[in-house]
């Protein structure tokens, strides 16, 4: 894909980093974001401003007052409205050059194949492990990267899953539900920080840059701002990605 004169102007500052060829790679991407809450509402903002070609956002929820401390796409006037409808409208205003598609539904075993049919990658904005495991399996099946992040309280985790090369989500958590029951405690800056890192991971991966968290899990403990980093490895006997 070639860039228009308007795009050359719009992305001129990041072209100094990526070059026209890199921006064309981003323009050609089809990205699916599952969950447009604390993580997804921020990642979609920066994916749209980055200039990915097609952005599909999937969520079944309505905007609630309790979302507003952390879900950056929404305001008081949006309370009660479907998240995807509001997100599409606002993202289109941010960057009309990105094709934004909203799907107001939950991702399930029954629909995940259709939702990810044309996807080049998946960005995790979920707040539950069940949906993550469903998408993880589909990403392994389709051989597309899964940019995972999660948070609770002031703690956050992030890694990049590349099928066939890294541990998958099932390798990492063994199919367990690692989320606490009940409302998840969270301040807005924690998912925002992780979401921006997800977009950076996506960019570094598709532009073949160093710094991708493959087989590494970065953990931001609640006691400090600097993350700990642990090595993770693929389980050859994994039910999802094992040989």
Image: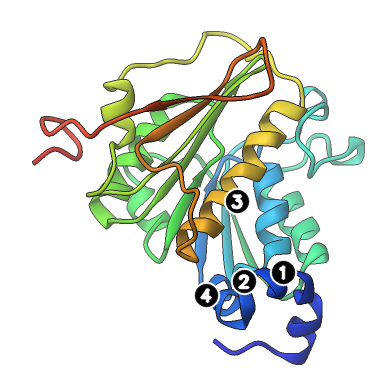
Within 10 Å of disc 3 (Cα), the crowding (few <14, some 14-19, many 20+) is many
Residue behind mark 3: 199
Within 10 Å of disc 1 (Cα), the crowding (few <14, some 14-19, many 20+) is some
CA separation, marks 4 and 2?
A: 10 Å
Q: Is residue 1 above or below residue 195?
A: below
CA separation, marks 3 and 1?
A: 14 Å
Q: Residue at x 78, y 71 (%)?
A: 13
Within 10 Å of disc 4 (Cα), the crowding (few <14, some 14-19, many 20+) is some
Mark whose residue sits in front, 4 or 2 = 2
Mark whose residue sits in front, 3 or 1 = 1
Label ID, residue 236: none
Q: Quadrant of the N terminus?
A: bottom right
Secondary structure of the residue carrying tag 1 is helix
Q: Indicate the position of residue 35 as horizontal and vertical percent values.
A: 58, 40
Q: Residue at x 56, y 70 (%)?
A: 26
Q: Indicate the position of residue 89 as horizontal and vertical percent values.
A: 78, 59
CA separation, marks 3 and 4?
A: 14 Å
CA separation, marks 4 and 1?
A: 13 Å
Residue behind mark 2: 18
Label ID, residue 14: 1
Residue behind mark 4: 25
User: Quarter-wise, where is residue 18 in the image?
Assistant: bottom right
Q: Earlier in the sequence, mark 3 or mark 1?
A: 1
């Amino acid at each position: 894909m070639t860039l228009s004169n308007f795009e050359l102007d719009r992305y001129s500052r990041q072209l100094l980093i990526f070059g026209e060829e890199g921006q064309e790679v981003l323009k050609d991407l089809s990205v699916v974001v599952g969950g447009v809450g604390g993580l997804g509402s921020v990642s979609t903002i920066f994916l749209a401003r980055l200039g990915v070609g097609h952005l599909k956002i999937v969520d079944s929820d309505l905007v609630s007052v309790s979302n507003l401390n952390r879900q950056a796409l929404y305001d008081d006037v949006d309370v009660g409205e479907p998240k995807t409808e509001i997100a599409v409208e606002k993202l289109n205003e941010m960057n009309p050059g990105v094709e934004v598609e909203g799907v107001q539904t939950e991702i399930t075993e029954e629909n995940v194949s259709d939702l990810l049919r044309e996807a080049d990658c998946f960005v995790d904005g979920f707040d539950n492990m069940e949906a993550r495991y469903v998408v993880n399996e589909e990403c392994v099946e389709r051989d597309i990267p899964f940019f995972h992040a999660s948070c609770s309280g002031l703690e956050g985790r992030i890694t990049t899953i590349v099928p066939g090369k890294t541990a998958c989500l099932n390798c990492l958590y063994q199919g367990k539900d690692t989320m606490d029951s009940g409302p998840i405690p969270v301040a807005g800056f924690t998912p925002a920080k992780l979401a921006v890192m997800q977009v950076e991971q996506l960019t570094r991966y598709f532009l073949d840059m160093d710094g991708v968290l493959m087989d590494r899990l970065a953990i931001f403990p609640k006691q400090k701002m600097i993350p700990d980093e642990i090595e993770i490895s693929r389980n050859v006997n994994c039910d999802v990605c094992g040989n």
